[in-house]
Amino acid sequence: MFDNFTDLFSAPLTINWTLSFRCNFSCSHCYSRDEQVAELETADVKKIIDILVAKKIPFINFGGGEPLIREDLFVIAAYATAQGLNVSMNSNGSLLDESAATRLLKSGFKSVGISIDSADPALHDDFRNMPGSFEKAVAALRVLQNVGLKRTMSSVISRINFQHFHELLDLARRYEVAQVYLHNFKCSGRGFKNREDLDLTPAEWKTFYVEALRVKQQTHDLAISFDDPVISSLPGYDTDPLVNGSSCGKLSLNLRPNGDLTPCGFIPLTVGNILHDDFDEIWYNSPVLNQMRNKRAGGKCLDCGSYEACQGGCTARSYAVTGDFNQPDPHCWK
């Protein structure tokens, strides 16, 4: 374990919570669309919130699946908010009309992220395997804007958009989106099955990130965020992150619909169940989490001067492609 890791972080800062794997879309890159697991009742969800409060975990982000499929989402969010938790969510936008937006605001959501993967409606709809999904996502941004709820936009970078991400930023500006997340392609679930068609080559990833970091440095009206440690060797990268390498298992954990905890949604390794196992025992002593916090350089990382900063890149991607946390990120261009 890191010498000072658990002194600095006695619990994760964020729980990324999948309340349900159910979804009305069938996206080409989805990590969870083919998953099925029992869902907890509202009472057990509230018990989990009590645990998170006791552990002083400040942030919950609901993902999925589509969070709005859970009819008790508003009740759950209001319960968490009443106890001081900061609640956000990510949605495909299809179920988010003005009534839902108002209920999200009243139940205490701090922000809502809408997934849009191309400013070209046809490309977005094809990527999401859902005709009309672009118009519904844009309509969701509009109603969130109308009710005054903070909006973010999430875009998974892939072959359909890596040369046109500027257009996504322009779309975000149109609806006064506060922040755009340009997510790396994870290669998990359906993303693994479709990666030859959708993923970029390492050289293309470098070209994309060099340009995206340049744009980020020159952009002042919109926050642009990345979640890919492989970029740490490039000019313009934030050189003072809270942790080096992947943040999963260090700053965040993932909750599945049945209460199982995993390091992140893209690493399907259960480290315990939050309702049945001691949280501190999981957080401090899980062999899986401690392996991820103490990765060892393997392959070409052995001779790389950037390893200390990037820690081999995205752990989820390395594990998905090689089955080994310590292998180099397959996106790495070095």
Image (tube, rainbow, N blue to C red):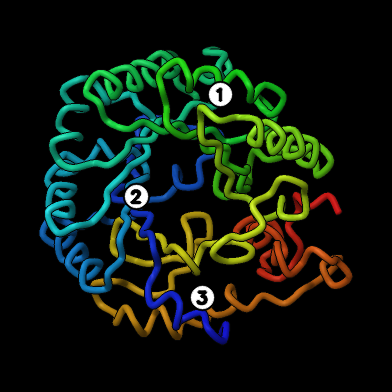
Residue occupying the point 27% across, 25% down: 96
How packed mark 1 is, by other alpha carbons closer than 10 Å (few <14, some 14-19, many 20 or more), is many
* Residue contact at pointers 1 and 2, CB within 8 angstroms: no
The residue that mark 1 highlights is 169
* Residue contact at pointers 2 and 3, CB within 8 angstroms: no
Residue occupying the point 77% across, 67% down: 307
Quadrant, the C terminus? bottom right
Q: Mark 3 or mark 1: which comes first in sequence? A: 1
Eyeballing the image, is 23 above or below 334?
above
Q: As rendered, which of 273 and 81 lies closer to the eye?
A: 81
Q: Position of residue 229 (x, y in %)?
A: 66, 55
Residue occupying the point 33% across, 36% down: 112
**Side of 21 where 220 appears, left or right:** right
Label 3: which secondary element = helix
Tell me the kind of residue under disc 2.
Asn
Quarter assignment of residue 12: bottom left
Q: Position of residue 61 (x, y in %)?
A: 34, 49
CA gap between label 2 and label 3 equals 20 Å
Label 3 vs label 1, nearer the camera:
1
The residue that mark 2 highlights is 61
Label 1: which secondary element = helix
Label 1 vs label 2, nearer the camera:
1
Eyeballing the image, is 99 above or below 185?
above
Eyeballing the image, is 198 above or below 255?
above
Tell me the kind of residue under disc 3.
Leu
How packed mark 2 is, by other alpha carbons closer than 10 Å (few <14, some 14-19, many 20 or more), is many
Q: As rendered, which of 45 and 143 lies closer to the eye?
A: 143
The residue that mark 3 highlights is 289
